[in-house]
Image (cartoon, rainbow, N blue to C red):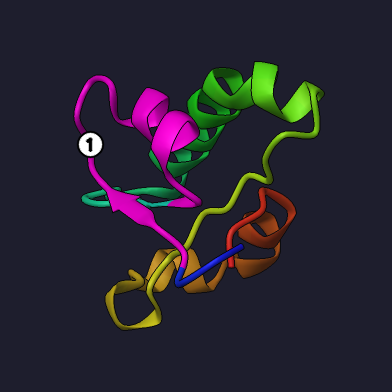
Amino acid sequence: MLGPPILLGSEAKRAFERVVDYCDGWIPINRANIDGFKQAIKELREAALPALSNNAMALNVLQLTGSTPPSYKSEAADLSVLGVS
């Protein structure tokens, strides 16, 4: 990879398509609970499936520590399994 990674922080309808097409990862915004976050990861994986199956990209999700709700911290192992760093 040349240069810094391009990350998109968005909740727009087509955000995951844009992440797959143009970015190196996704920064979740306004995910109030772990179940909503898990659903978003599932949707992102579905959007990325064609590229992932061709090994054309890695799926990166970044949850910023400073904005991590306490409920997420207690479920860090679950998030790690989902690919959140």
Instruction: Please identify the quarter of the rendering in which residue 15 is found.
Output: top left
x and y, in percent, of residue 50 in the image: 67, 16
Reply yes or no: does residue 18 show up in magenta. yes
Front in this rendered view, residue 61 or 76: 61
The N terminus: image quadrant? bottom right
76 or 13: nearer the viewer? 13
Please give left or right for residue 44 compared with residue 29 in the image: right
- Three-letter code for the amino acid on which mark 1 is drawn: Glu
Residue at the far front in the pictured view: 2
Which residue does the image show at 43% across and 45% down from the upper left? 23
The foreground one among 37 and 58 is 58
How far across and down, in percent of the image, does residue 37 sit? 43, 43
Residue under numbered circle 1:
11
| Range of residues picked out in magenta | 5-25
Q: Residue at x 31, y 83 (%)?
A: 66
In the image, what residue occupies the spot 80% across and 34% down?
A: 55
